[in-house]
Amino acid sequence: MDYSYSEEVDPKLYETHGLTSHTKLRIHKDSVREIEGTLRAQEDWSKHVHPINNYHGGLGDRYSFIRVTLPECLPDRLELISYANEFAFLYDDEMENLDFQHANSNSGGILDIFKHEALSSDIGSTTRPEKRLQAQILSEMMAIDSSQAMTSMKAWAKFIQMAAETRKTSFKTLKSYIPARVIDAGELFWYGLLTFGMGITIPENERDLCMKLAKPGYAAMALTNDLYSWEKERIAAENLGRNYVFNAIWVIMEERAVDENEAKNICSDEIRNYMADYEQVVETARNDKNLSKELRKYLEAVLLTCVGNTKYSITIATESGTTLINLFRHTSDDRQKGLRPRQDVVDGSPVEIRSAGDYVGNEPTDVFGASVVITAEGNISEDFIELLEPEQLPGDIIRELSLVSLKTSKRVSSPQLPTKLMGHI
């Protein structure tokens, strides 16, 4: 596969905990469109569904989700892909709060948006807000490529219904759990997102083969997600009063009567084995001219997703999630009203983090040793950048600065940023 929109990341700059070996991490060159799509989705969800609290989403440090898992996304589709993915993250949070083992007629209402109406952009007065957003996504995708949009939405609809079924079972063995977890982790969703994002059309006669060949890659991703989300999911299950956790660590502990640390080691070994198997699949397919170019491109793209997903999973598990990016996650209404300040921790020290509305007209606030002032137009003072070199700034702050002018009152594109920042966005 030719690389047109991404660049390879020096292995010295990221950690994989030995879960990936030969394949290098790649990152999309455009950070701005991912941020725009992700924040647009968060604001739409907050406005139309319910407010978002203590939510991380796809943005994190420099290696944010879509940029590292879909590094060859077509630039003109990156903003929409980021929006759709963030919608899926938010939707997944809703799904995880449903107890499918004890489902009743009212508990699965959220699933209805992906039943018979999944391929329709029609909405009415009684339409769920999630469906309205899903219809908006479909409409925007159709405007770009109607054929690929329909393929993606069909895959997404099938994924949601199959995933709901998988969580109705409490699995006793890892062997039986993994196929279900592959479904639940979003195999079909990612198929739809990846093919649309990269403009790939898998021939009809190769679709079953495509899913079969990519299975080890999706298994590696599913287990990686389980490994790094274990603590969060265990606590969530306890808070909900559940006697099980839909996670490979729990299955391994139950099946093999081992403690948590040993279960994590076993899970890590399984990930390495699946990654090795899938790298071999991709290498073999790369030289098999009997396979279509589109299928070979898809398989290699999934391999890049595996590596990016590993990096992102490690990032989410290790970072605090408390950064100045929160300043810009509020809607315009929030900025006008202002939100009550709260205490967060930045670089180990407590810092009062507020909405942009709270900063307007106030005295400069010291953050990272720099005097930060946000104007009524939402701009950040120049001295915040001048005091520190870009290497010292957290990646998420640098990305946010790509959306906000440092010297003017206009929202600008990255080429207008100071030269010293351009190499770090």
Image: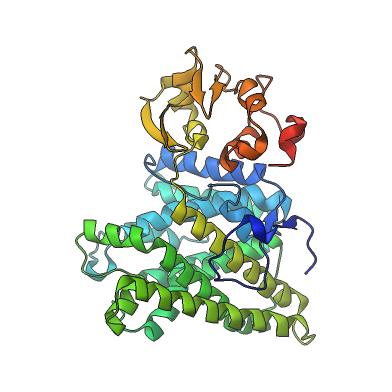
Locate residue 303: give its quadrant: bottom right
User: Residue 12 sits in which quadrant?
Assistant: bottom right
Residue occupying the point 39% across, 41% down: 52
Left or right: 4 in relation to 93: right
| Frontmost residue, 318 versus 304 | 318
The quadrant of the rendering that contains the C terminus is: top right
Residue drawn at (41%, 21%), measured in percent from left and top?
337
Question: Whole-percent x and y of residue 194?
Answer: 63, 64
Percent across and percent down for residue 156 are 51, 65
> What colour scheme does the image use?
rainbow
Front residue of this view, candidates 360 and 16:
16
53 to 241, vertically: above or below: above
Where is residue 163? Give x, y as percent. 41, 70
Image point (60%, 22%), residue name: 379
Residue 371, percent across and down? Answer: 55, 20
Measured along the vertical axis of the image, is residue 248 above or below residue 107? below
The residue positioned 60% from the left and 62% from the top of the image is 308
